[in-house]
Image: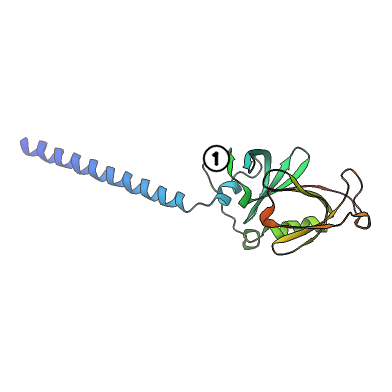
Amino acid sequence: MRWEALFADMEARWDAEASAELERDIAEATRFEQAAVGLVDRLRAQIGAMVTVALPGERLVEMRLDAVGEDWIAGSEGHQGIVVPLQAVQSVEGLLRRAAHEHSHVRRRMGLSMVLRGMTRDRAVVEIRGAEGGVLVHGLLVNVGRDHCEVARTIAGEVPRLRRAQGVRTVPFAAMTEIRAEAHPPS
């Protein structure tokens, strides 16, 4: 009987050690997997949900997340569309602990310049804000380069017309913290 008890005890210890080792391996694999997840993947898993984005100058934007690109997020705050360059995001509240990878190669590489070009095509009137929340420019988005855009300055509330612009202002992407837009019909 002593031998049976001894073998049972040894078997129980071996099972406990094997179980503990398996748990350590699972925990390590989980940490490794989480370390490979990028912010854009976490944000992509929240498309359709409300998130609160903290921007420079202690500004908070509560937005419904509609799209996520390689270096930007887009959604709506009330009736206004908003695009936020990821470099301006200081924190995000409301993310769940899941991620979604983008399988489309094209969508994965879609940068801020592509989004702004689409807005130019739609003749969007934009308000671009800088680091402290101040408006850098308000007007009709007319041209987008690799790292900047040009906005024909118009008067807020008026139908935007290029010929009545008060000049064109060039804004580097690095200066932008948010781009707010409302589409207007072509003039």
Looking at the picture, does residue 56 appear above or below residue 123? above
> Is residue 100 visible in the rendered structure shown here?
no
Residue 7, x across and y down, in percent: 12, 41
Q: Quadrant of residue 95?
A: top right
Residue 102, x across and y down, in percent: 59, 55
Residue 105, x across and y down, in percent: 62, 62
> Is residue 95 visible in the rendered structure shown here?
yes
Left or right: where does residue 169 sit relative to residue 26? right
Quarter in which the N terminus is drawn: top left
Kindly identify the residue that appears in the image at 93 percent across and 58 percent down.
Answer: 163
Kindly identify the residue that appears in the image at 68 percent across and 48 percent down.
Answer: 177
Left or right: where does residue 22 sit relative to residue 109? left
| The one of 132 and 104 positioned closer to us in this rendering | 132
Kindly identify the residue that appears in the image at 17 percent across and 42 percent down.
Answer: 11
Q: Quadrant of residue 8?
A: top left
Residue type at numbered disc 1: Leu
**Mark 1: few/some/many CA within 10 Å (<14, 14-19, 20+):** few
Q: Residue furthest bottom?
A: 146
- Provide the residue designation for mark 1: 96
| The one of 165 and 120 positioned closer to us in this rendering | 165
Residue 41, x across and y down, in percent: 56, 51
- Number of numbered discs overlaid on the protein picture: 1
